[in-house]
Image: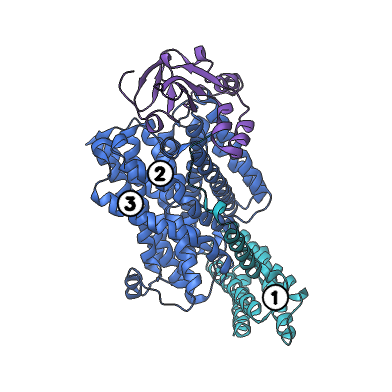
Chain colours: A blue, B cyan, C purple
Amino acid sequence: MNKIFGVALGILAAIGGFVDIGDLVFNVAAGATFGYQLLWVVVIGVVGIITYSEMCGRVSAVSQKAVFDAVRERVGFKAGLITLIAAEIVNAMTLTAEIGGVAICLQLLSGLPYRLLIVLAAIVLAIVVWIVNFDWIERIFGYGGLCLLVFAVAAVKLHPDWGAVGHGFVPHVDTGNKLLYGYFAIGLLGAAMTPYEVYFYSSGAVEEGWTVKDLGLNRLNAIVGYGLGGFLSFALMIVGGALFLGKGIDPATLGSIAMGAEVPLGQIGLLLALIGILFAVAGASIDTLFSGAYDLAQFCGFEWGRHKSPAGAPRFTLTWIVLLILAMLAVMTGVDAVKLTEFAVIFSVVALPLTYLPILLVANDKAYMGNYANGRLANVLGILYLVIIMIVALTAIPLMLLTNLGQG
Amino acid sequence: MGSPRIKRFHQHHPQAVTRCLAAVCAAALLAGCNGGTVDQHALKQDAGTIASLATEGELLANDVSKGASTTYFARVQSDNLRKQAANLADALGSRQTSAGIEPKVRKAGKLAGQVAGQLARLHHHPVNRTVAKSVQHRLSDLSDEADKLAK
Amino acid sequence: MSESIDLGLGLLDHQLLDKDGRRCGNVDDLAIEGGPGEPAEVVAILVGPDVWRERAGWIGRIAAWVARGGRVRIPWGEVAEVSAHVQLKKTAAEYGLGRGDDRLRPYIEKIPGSHR
């Protein structure tokens, strides 16, 4: 009974933890630009992250290796180093956008000056990570992120045309502006299939000492956690389509996104939305921060772990401190967090094949995986998504340039 | 050292890579060259942005007039919108325009300035329901005017 | 160590663990002896950023410079077990591994709460 309870709690935390600033920005913007037409792309993204993270979790449980251990072992030092550099660059951009997002949320809630809140956000995150047990961190930020369910209520209250919503789940392209449609499709896929989440998840699996007995839990976590998280993405897009599209509004700030809850639900809606966004983005920033440290530590071979005391893993600790300071300084230059989010999502999509392919190879390798190598379904999905990811990676930057970062 | 790997694509086909890079750069220039002359397409886009800012401000003002927002949120968000409108007003008021559309561009700039002005009122009175109502109506009119310019 | 191991997949780039299970680097390279005609034999494991120079061209050289050089040689006889990781017989300190962590630890320990 206790185990079921634990699993349910883990899933709840995953829902709140799935949505990060990239999902918020792209899902609402996609709704505001194309209505419900891109809902089917979100489904593809969710199935993709389920496939990818299940494979990573399985690799970690069976081989006791996290993603970057496996990447370096499988593709060698040089390719591994290039992958590491690409991953760290994308991570840094994402982290900067998220810290900026946290500061913006705090400003919208408190009215305090933005610059002050950036420093405050970084300090509070550092203290939380230093002192608080990671299980509690996951709970606090996961449950706080659950406030985002207010967007599901808002979506219903806005009375969308449910027929059109249903039609949005059927793959179709019904627009003159196909380039812009393509850009948003790629953004949505990139926002759903965030690599840092997978690095974080697989490192956690190794640290928790997962074995083959935990494979069922791994699958459950992936399917239910991300599936329900995908549901939040639908809600965001529906709000974008029901409220912003008709009025010709381009939601360019986090405040605009929060309006999506304020207009139908008033003050309570606004506060729940802001708190939900704050916890989701802050939680995501901790995941991103640690991913950056995990990747470097695993590649180089030095001690790492979220459960280790800071003194037990000194270089790992120094790494995340430096990453946090750099991100904080980057936000203080005044960069627009929402614009940076778009860049971060697009670049993470371009770098995605570099970590996806080695994991697919390792997951198929009977020498590593024994009987737990990819079965037929995992391989059909795995290869299908490899093709999707390669296409998306190749077209992402051209589309970004041709649509002027989604301005059409 | 290292094992004899297959020669990378860029080592086999240097011209193809150069051409590819040139194409990407050209696309980047074309895409990003909005910071120069304001042409018909840019005017349409900017008018759309003005309408969007005005409508968003209208929604916010409406919520404030009903007491459905919070002081801090209304104050900060209205200022965020105001800054965007003010930047547009500056750009449209001073940039070069392509032939024949200058009056329209300057008019759009003025409109953006008026939107910024209304948003500033909301920013300074984030709980005053009467001011909010008045701002809401003004922004509604301004957004309609911007829509006409975007046609 | 009589069973054959695929050096590329089973040994190279794997995580090194010391006697206490502490992570202390990856297998950055192998020292193999045996000329043409003789059986090749792994003689030692090489660890350290200095080793990266040879493995990754100019990127490796930059990475080695950033990580500030250093090379440790571990005779093959010190390997206790090769499984998911490469287990060594003694502690990291005895090999001169994990020095980065050891040098940094005193500073981290000055901050309260670092021994949570």
Q: Nearer the viewer, residue A91 or B65?
A: A91
Question: Mark 1 belongs to which subunit?
Answer: B
* Residue wearing tag 3: A382
Q: Nearer the viewer, residue A236 or A361?
A: A361
* Residue wearing tag 2: A358
* CA–CA distance in space, label 2 to label 3: 12 Å
Cβ–Cβ under 8 Å for marks 1 and 3: no
- At horizontal 32% and vertical 35% (from top left) the residue drawn is A368
**Mark 3: amino acid:** Gly
Question: Mark 3 belongs to which subunit?
Answer: A
Ranked by sequence position, the earlier of labels 2 and 3 is 2
Q: Where residue A330 sits in the image (x, y, percent)?
A: 65, 47
Quadrant in which the N terminus of chain B is drawn: top right
Q: Quadrant of residue B79?
A: bottom right
Q: Residue furthest left?
A: A1
**Mark 1: amino acid:** Gln
In the image: residue B130, left or right of residue A246: right
* Residue wearing tag 1: B114
Question: Mark 2 belongs to which subunit?
Answer: A
Secondary structure under the numbered disc 2 in the rendered image: helix
Mark 3, other Cα within 10 Å: few <14 / some 14–19 / many ≥20: many
Whether residue B5 is visible, yes or no, is yes
Q: Is residue A274 above or below residue B41?
A: above
